[in-house]
Image (cartoon, rainbow, N blue to C red):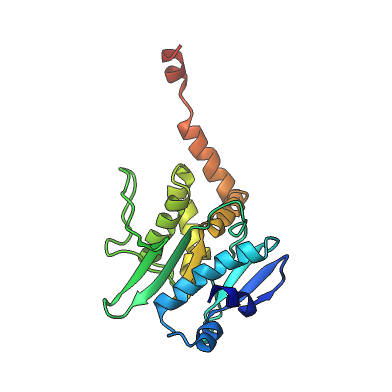
């Protein structure tokens, strides 16, 4: 199966490649299910990484009028780094959305004392509410666990507005896409101001410096 995947890739080998999931599944005689789409999409990301090392991004097309999902995976397909994948789909039998990180169910991250829980019922996406806010924060924290800005509302709410709130019903996103978004966000005026504030808050006070001498 894997060796046929490049036949379903189109686009610019030095720019953005697009993988047509529904056509591949149909011509391969495979059942078109959310789980199968997700698995094939993950494989496609890795095939692009290995086959087209010059590509800057890969988009996964779900077809069916859903347009392109996965947003921009810039930086996620370089050979020298492993690709970690977030994915989401709606489990009709359980009646709830499911989010996976590298194939494992993703849980709500523990809160710090100064943080609020937006959606106790869990993650969601595709609109601009509390479930997408939880997912935006969780994704950023998973990729950037040591970055204080990942937990700042000014950061994850912007990630929700630009990315999570616009996701299609089924989606894939690499950790590289998250890093690329964060790299762009930190150059914005709001990003710079938040990073400067957090750095100032983390700096030792005059009294703390004197007590350590």
Q: Residue at coordinates 54% horizontally, 42% vertically from top-left?
A: 195
Q: Position of residue 87 (x, y in %)?
A: 44, 67
Q: Residue at coordinates 35% horizontally, 69% vertically from top-left?
A: 98
Residue sitting nearer the eye, 115 or 103: 103
Give left or right: position of 176 versus 16.
left
Quadrant housing residue 86: bottom left
Q: Position of residue 135 (x, y in %)?
A: 40, 61
Q: Number of callouts in the render?
A: 0
Answer above or below: position of 19 versus 151.
Answer: below
Q: Position of residue 77 (x, y in %)?
A: 60, 60
Residue sitting nearer the eye, 189 or 144: 144
Give left or right: position of 116 versus 81.
left
Residue 65 in view here: no
Q: Residue at coordinates 47% horizontally, 48% vertically from top-left?
A: 144
Residue 49 in view here: yes
Quadrant housing residue 59: bottom right
Answer above or below: position of 194 versus 211.
Answer: below
The residue sitting at the top extreme is 213
Q: Position of residue 124 (x, y in %)?
A: 37, 68
Answer above or below: position of 196 versus 37.
Answer: above
Q: Residue at coordinates 56% horizontally, 56% vertically from top-left?
A: 176
Quadrant housing residue 92: bottom left
């Amino acid at each position: 199966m894997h060796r046929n995947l490049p036949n379903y890739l189109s686009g610019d080998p030095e720019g953005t490649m697009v993988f047509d999931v529904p056509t591949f599944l149909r011509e391969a005689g495979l059942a078109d299910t959310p789980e199968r789409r997700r698995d094939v999409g993950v494989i496609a990301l890795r095939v692009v990484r290995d086959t087209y090392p010059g590509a800057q991004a890969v988009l996964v097309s779900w077809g069916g009028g859903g347009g392109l999902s996965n947003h921009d995976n810039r930086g996620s397909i370089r050979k020298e780094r492993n690709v970690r994948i977030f994915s989401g789909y709606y489990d009709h039998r359980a009646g709830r959305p499911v989010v996976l990180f590298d194939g494992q169910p993703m849980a709500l991250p523990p809160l710090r004392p100064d943080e609020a829980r937006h959606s106790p019922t869990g993650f969601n996406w595709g609109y601009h509410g509390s479930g997408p806010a939880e997912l935006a924060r969780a994704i950023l924290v998973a990729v950037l666990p040591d970055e204080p800005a990942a937990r700042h509302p000014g950061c994850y709410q912007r990630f929700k507005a630009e990315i999570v709130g616009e996701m299609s019903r089924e989606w894939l996103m690499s950790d590289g896409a998250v890093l690329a978004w964060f790299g762009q966000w930190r150059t914005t005026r709001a990003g710079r101001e938040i990073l400067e504030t957090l750095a100032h808050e983390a700096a030792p006070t005059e009294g703390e410096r004197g007590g350590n001498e």
